[in-house]
Amino acid sequence: MGSRFWRMYAAYFTTTIGDELYIVALPLVLLQLGYAAATATFLRGALTGATVLAGLTMGYLIDRHDTYYLLSRSYGISAVFLIAASGALAAGVDGFLVALAAAAVLGLFAAITAAAVDAGIPRTVSDRRSIRHGYSLVESARTIAVIAGPAFAGLLVTTGSLLIVTLANAASFALAALLSRARRPIPVEAPQTHPPRIRDGLRMVATDTRLRLGITLSLLGNLTLGAEQPLFLARMVQDFGLSASVTAVVVALAGAASVVASTITVRHARAVPAGTAMVVAVAVLAATAAGVGLAPGPVPASALYALFSVAVICYGVYWRTYRQDVTPGELLGRVSATCRSIAYSGIVVGVLVVGVLQELGVSTRTLLTVGGLVCLAGVAVVGPLVRRVTAEVRQAPRPS
């Protein structure tokens, strides 16, 4: 794979663990401190909304600038802001307001770094035949992080301190900034005859049916189930009376199941058509989310959440590698950022609706059940179309 890839991978892996720790520990501590369940939902909306904005407006940076340059500066700025947020918490500023501001800033740079890693894999591997393996490793890093992050979160939430959680995430960004400092530039994959433009990525996403099919499924799942994790955390803590640390362990165990699923999926990815695999994955997401809402106790709810996590990873493996297959290398950064932003816009809308409904008194159980059933209905309508489109374009020539 080469040293350039492994340095980028190490930085990504470090921040992914920090992020998973943060997004689990932060709402759990807020719930422990007596904040309403809607606060966790609105935090998810702020983080995702900023990611959407950055992806739509800054994707061209990835195709124009050195990968290490973008990563080191994005990680460094995130670390500095989290340190400043820690100072605000220590000074007694309301924890929810600080968390909202941090979510907005982190979301901006999350879009840049995620797309930079996507586009950076073809630039950093030592052999182009290793590109697919690079994507598999990155996806596996995320699955490992969904175990390690919540496991560390389970330790931190016992302190009941937002300050400690924030400092822990700041440390992960600071370390990643050091790991991604450039020793030598990583040039873009193809020379640009003119400065990369935002509309180039938007145009390809708008006109390429092969990309639209994945975005359609992503939007469907995100609109209906984008708030699933904060709802699950609230259900375990508030509905079933579990402690925050036990809930974090449940999330970590779900991550362990996802690692196994990721390994199996990568190994057999070519045996199943992409459209079929993605449709099935979203259907499983919908059914398990509704099941969590209907579950009579924490044990079946935890088992269904683990299956939900497996389906998320399986969908991610197919969609991410499929997107790389059908996108020209010089557009990969913009297309990745644009796809992520469009898909994540569904989360923004979904979590805002859920947050308002929570404030109006709608139960967590009802929100999960209805969201899952609506998603299932959407799959029944969209699924056959997606599979037909996939079959029609399967023999289309790959872009140069």
Image (cartoon, grey):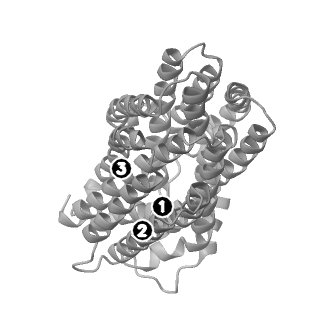
In the displayed image of the protein, which residue is found farthest to the bottom?
A: 194
Report the residue that reaches farthest toward the top: 296
Horizontal side, residue 8 vs residue 312: left or right: left
Q: Give the mark count.
A: 3
The picture places residue 308, in percent across and down from the top left corner, at 51, 29
SS for callout 1: loop
13 vs 371, left or right, is: left
Between marks 1 and 3 in the image, the one whose residue lies nearer the viewer: 3
Location of residue 118 (image quadrant): bottom left
* Residue furthest right as drawn: 360
Q: Nearer the viewer, residue 242 or 285?
A: 242
The residue at the point 37 percent across, 35 percent down is: 262
Tell me the residue that label 2 is attached to: 83
Residue named by callout 3: 17
Q: Which mark is residue 360?
A: none
Q: Position of residue 120 (x, y in %)?
A: 36, 66
* The C terminus: image quadrant: bottom left
Say left or right for 9 vs 338.
left
* Type of amino acid at the residue the image marks with label 2: Ile
Quarter placement of the N terminus:
bottom left
What's the distance in space between the residues labelled 2 and 3, CA to CA? 18 Å
- Can you give x and y, in whole percent of width and height, for residue 180 in the image? 29, 70
Picture disc at residue 399:
1
